[in-house]
Amino acid sequence: MMTETGKTVSVIVPVYQVKKYIKATVDTVRAQTYRDWELLLVEDGSTDGTRETIEEYLNVLQDERIRLICLPGNGGAANARNRGLEQARGRYIAYLDADDLWEEHKLEREVAFAQSRKAGFVFTGYEFADENGKGLGKIVRVPAELSYRQALKNTTIFTSTVMFDTELVPKTLLEMPLVKSEDTALWWKVLRKGYIAYGLDENLVRYRRIGKSLSSNKLEAVRRIWNLYRKVEGLGLPESAWNFCFWAVRAVFRRL
């Protein structure tokens, strides 16, 4: 599918210790039916041979739409995404984690959806997958819209499904806070400004559940979200507890 000039999607991928998965990540973007994209691989100081694997693969592919950005050390996913954002040239900003996969029409469907809604912030449904990227049949449905207050109680916005239109949401607003659960912190920061997040309720992403990933540590996840309520959003104890109860219930049901 050929696309219109000026509608490039910049796909930002923070890369750290993912030698096993990174080729599949590159391939899932190259397989997109929407062809007007650039892929920014932000290498964040891996020591497992990830950088060398990427360099070798890019030499084979010779795809000028893919750029490797090498950072001097490991600064974390938020910093890596911010460095990618600085160098992004596209109108649209899409995030993809280095071990997740997209269905081939993900970008095509999401760009069309954003344009039809005149939306600056969109996200989609997704499916949990095993370590090999095979879907497990557990699909997360998403609401049609989320405001800031609604999003405080509903964290179904998953990073690898998100896309921003920088003609509607200023690029300067998209810098991720350097905190744990930085992605959720960014969604709330944008929504707090009065924007609405629009959900495309289609399964367009596969989210690998890797046993040792940060998100698999449930206690740590609880601490991170509570910290966002109290220290990042500055909510009082009663309001934090109220929102947290809704978040916890939804988080459990997403994984059942």
Image: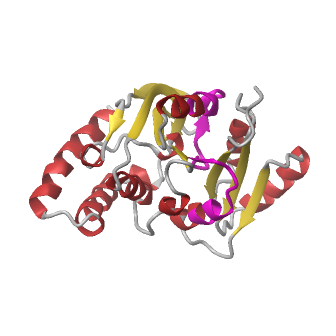
Residue 141: quadrant of the picture = top left
Residue 122 percent across, percent down from the top left: 47, 39
Q: Is residue 75 left or right of residue 62?
A: left
Q: Is residue 16 visible?
A: no
Please name whichever residue, 134 or 78, is drawn nearer the observer in this view of the structure.
Answer: 78
Residue 201: quadrant of the picture = top left
Please name whichever residue, 170 or 71, is drawn nearer the observer in this view of the structure.
Answer: 170
Point 84% across, 51% down: residue: 58
Q: Is residue 136 above or below residue 190?
A: above
Point 40% across, 52% down: residue: 187
Image quadrant occupied by the N terminus: top right
Q: Is residue 52 magenta?
A: no
Colour setup of the view: secondary structure
Residue at the outermost bottom position: 72
Q: Is residue 162 above or below residue 33?
A: below
Residue 45 percent across, percent down from the top left: 66, 69
Q: Is residue 91 above or below residue 223?
A: above
Please name whichever residue, 103 or 110, is drawn nearer the observer in this view of the structure.
Answer: 110
* Range covered by the magenta-colored residues: 82-110
Residue at the outermost left position: 238
Q: Is residue 131 visible?
A: yes
Q: How many badges with numbers are in the image? A: 0
Point 22% across, 40% down: residue: 249
